[in-house]
Image (cartoon, rainbow, N blue to C red):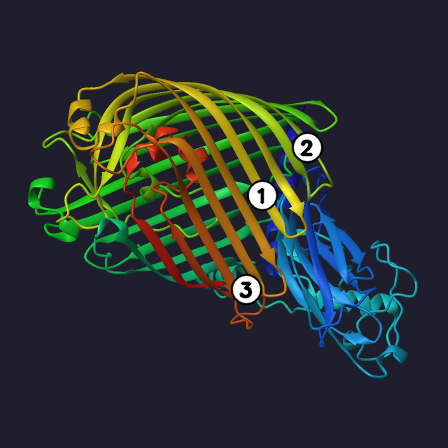
């Protein structure tokens, strides 16, 4: 190309860029124009079910319950006033309407894959209201021509399309309009006049303030704040109950477009033993072909000589702090319909564990569809379990995360804490049936588990110690091989349950601290070979009339360690965990709830943590005299 032509092209390009920048500087910042977002429908849809009644408690049929958000859907109540609405996971606004009634009900809900939520709606009958009827324009919601818009949304004689559009603008969350979820409305922007900015500094300050304001106003925050009280006791052993401790818990999260959600949470307990935990996490939506979850957590426990019966001989200094930090990431790929793989890695650091403080726990799994809702699943993991890890690291469930409130010491004086290492492989086949969003499943699985340096946990060895103090020792290495049968799902409209029965054979190889354990608890040392029968069941029930949620977990096993030093053989026993949440009939924040939480448990490890930490089958069986923990308080959800 001749040099003159090159100069001409370069000059034109520079002039265009200059004019473009100048024009952008002179124009006001454009508002976001909603862009249609195509969300891939997933077979793992969520479900909203509920009951619609009037202000006198009578059921109302023919009420249109509309969901607007990631997608749009509508269902009508049947003769019993009930409705069912299947939705792709995402954020929605729920609205109820019917001729002759006024409903102030508008609620923002988040639908998750394969999860059913329940919402009960009350609408008010208005005499003569049915004569004031406004027909619903075509919206793609599948509404009949005779369905009416809410009368309270009609303030003047406007077209049906304008009324519907105005209702959407008033009631859709800002995130729906901003991210392009749901309808795309052609709204003319408000006129704005150009004012030149005085300086770059003024522009930077103005834009920073505008961005900060937009973040807090436009972000659809959700979370909860809990004020709880926890205590432990064991009257059967004659111990005094531990003084109650207060726990403050805060969780805050928000969506990131249509891709995922972030959340942060923290908890702090006070009293003689001060401990705190904090976590930050991002999780992609399950409807994505590639979804991942990544985060980090930190927990600390600080106690002094005399706290809960701890003496200076047990501590490295008169005032000691134990900390645990974790980085983790889990990745899931949906390669094709019915073909999924997942893998993850957790890196932990414990400052109180000897023999190296940094540990890695990898995991890998796959799920393959074999036919009509028949799946083959396989997984393998290698986890490091340190004493007290279940309190330092966050649980996988959505319940409150309690900071470490128990102290522990080595059974053998001067011995360092040694973590156990659990390697596990599991292969199973599962059959799903029932409606999507209310599916049930039954399956069978085979497993292999090898634990090196299996921990034994012993409470109440010294009556002078506090009820929350325990000793740990290494019993040895153990290998289990067995199979199990599982059944889970929604068995009624109000009850979700799961049952897992397994039979396994264990082979033991005792360690150097086995003699010290046998001196205080002979039944903690098992025969070289033994057979374990285990039955673990979980029940989740919802009583919509009183807005009560009940969660019960119970585990029975044939090989629990005896609590008395004279018993030489394990025994058949059980452990339980019960939680009751009762919603109060008023809302502190629009769309929020206040719940009273009461819980009691004599399990040492949270049953939900087994999947997250790869816990050994013997962790609960070798826990002796675990005291009952009582938890109560108020939860504010928003």
Q: Nearer the viewer, mark 2 or mark 1?
A: 1
Residue at the spot of label 2: 432
Which of disc 1 and disc 2 is earlier in sequence? 2
Closer to viewer: mark 3 or mark 1: 1
Which residue is more in the foreground, 211 or 383?
Answer: 383
Is disc 2 in contact with disc 1, using a CB cutoff of under 8 Å?
no
Mark 2 or mark 3: which is in front?
2
Q: Residue at x 47, y 59 (%)?
A: 224
State the mark number for residue 217. 3
Lateral position of residue 491 relative to residue 226, left or right: right
- Disc 1 marks which residue? 497
* Nearest to N terminus: mark 2 or mark 3: 3
Most extreme residue toward the front is: 566
- Residue placed at 61% from the left, 53% from the top? 110
Quarter assignment of residue 434: top right
**Whole-Å distance between the Cαs marked 2 and 3?**
43 Å
User: Which secondary structure, mark 3?
Assistant: helix
């Amino acid at each position: 190309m001749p040099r003159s032509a090159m100069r001409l092209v370069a000059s034109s390009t520079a002039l265009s860029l200059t004019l473009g920048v100048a024009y952008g500087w002179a124009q006001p910042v454009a508002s976001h124009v909603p862009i249609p977002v195509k969300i891939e429908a997933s077979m793992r849809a969520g479900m909203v079910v509920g009951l619609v009644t009037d202000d006198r408690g009578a059921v109302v049929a023919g009420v249109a319950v509309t969901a607007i958000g990631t997608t749009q859907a509508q269902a009508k109540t049947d003769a019993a006033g009930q409705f069912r609405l299947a939705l792709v996971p995402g954020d929605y606004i729920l609205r109820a309407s019917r001729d002759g009634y006024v409903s102030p009900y508008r609620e923002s809900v988040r639908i998750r894959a394969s999860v059913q939520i329940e919402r009960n709606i009350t609408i008010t009958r208005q005499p003569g209201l049915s004569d004031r009827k406004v027909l619903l324009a075509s919206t793609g919601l599948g509404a009949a021509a005779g369905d009416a818009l809410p009368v309270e949304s009609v303030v003047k004689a406007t077209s049906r399309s304008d009324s519907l559009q105005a209702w959407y603008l008033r009631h859709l969350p800002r995130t729906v309009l901003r991210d392009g979820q749901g309808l795309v409305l052609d709204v003319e922007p408000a006129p704005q006049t150009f004012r030149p900015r005085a300086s770059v500094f003024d522009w930077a300050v103005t834009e920073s303030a505008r961005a900060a304001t937009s973040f807090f106003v436009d972000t659809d925050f959700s979370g909860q704040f809990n004020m709880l009280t926890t205590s432990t006791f064991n009257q059967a052993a004659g111990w005094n109950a531990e003084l109650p401790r207060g726990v403050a818990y805060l969780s805050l999260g928000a969506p990131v477009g249509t891709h995922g959600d972030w959340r942060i949470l923290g908890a702090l307990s006070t009293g003689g033993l001060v401990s705190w935990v904090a976590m930050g996490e991002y999780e992609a939506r399950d409807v994505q072909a590639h979804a991942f979850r990544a985060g980090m957590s930190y927990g600390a426990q600080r106690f002094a000589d005399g706290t809960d019966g701890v003496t200076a001989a047990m501590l490295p200094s008169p005032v000691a702090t134990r900390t645990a930090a974790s980085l983790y990431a889990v990745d899931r790929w949906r390669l094709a319909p019915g073909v999924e793989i997942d893998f993850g890695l957790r890196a932990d650091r414990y400052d109180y564990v000897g023999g190296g403080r940094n540990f890695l726990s990898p995991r890998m799994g796959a799920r393959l569809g074999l036919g009509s809702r028949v799946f083959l699943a396989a997984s393998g993991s290698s986890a490091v379990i340190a004493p007290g890890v279940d309190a330092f690291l966050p649980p996988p469930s959505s319940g409150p995360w309690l900071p470490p409130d128990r102290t522990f010491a080595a059974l053998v004086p001067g011995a360092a804490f040694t973590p156990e290492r659990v390697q596990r492989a599991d292969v199973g086949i599962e059959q799903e049936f029932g409606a999507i969003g209310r599916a049930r499943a039954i399956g069978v699985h085979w497993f292999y588990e090898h634990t090196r340096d299996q921990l034994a946990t012993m409470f109440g060895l010294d009556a002078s110690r506090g009820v929350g103090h325990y000793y740990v020792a290494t019993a040895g290495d153990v290998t289990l091989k067995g199979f199990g049968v599982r059944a889970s799902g929604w068995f009624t409209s109000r009850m979700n349950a799961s049952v897992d029965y397994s039979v396994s054979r264990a082979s033991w190889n005792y360690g150097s601290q086995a003699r010290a354990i046998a001196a205080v608890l002979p039944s903690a040392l098992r025969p070289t070979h033994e057979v374990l029968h285990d039955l673990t069941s979980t029940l989740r029930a919802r009583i919509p009339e009183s807005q009560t949620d009940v969660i019960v977990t119970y585990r029975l096993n044939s090989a629990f360690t005896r609590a008395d030093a004279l018993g030489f053989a394990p025994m058949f026993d059980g452990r339980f965990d019960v939680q009751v949440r009762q919603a109060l009939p008023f809302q502190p924040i629009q769309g929020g709830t206040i719940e009273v939480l009461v819980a009691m448990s004599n399990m040492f490890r949270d049953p939900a943590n087994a999947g997250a930490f790869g816990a050994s089958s013997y962790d609960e069986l070798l826990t002796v005299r675990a005291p009952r923990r009582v938890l109560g308080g108020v939860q504010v959800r928003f």
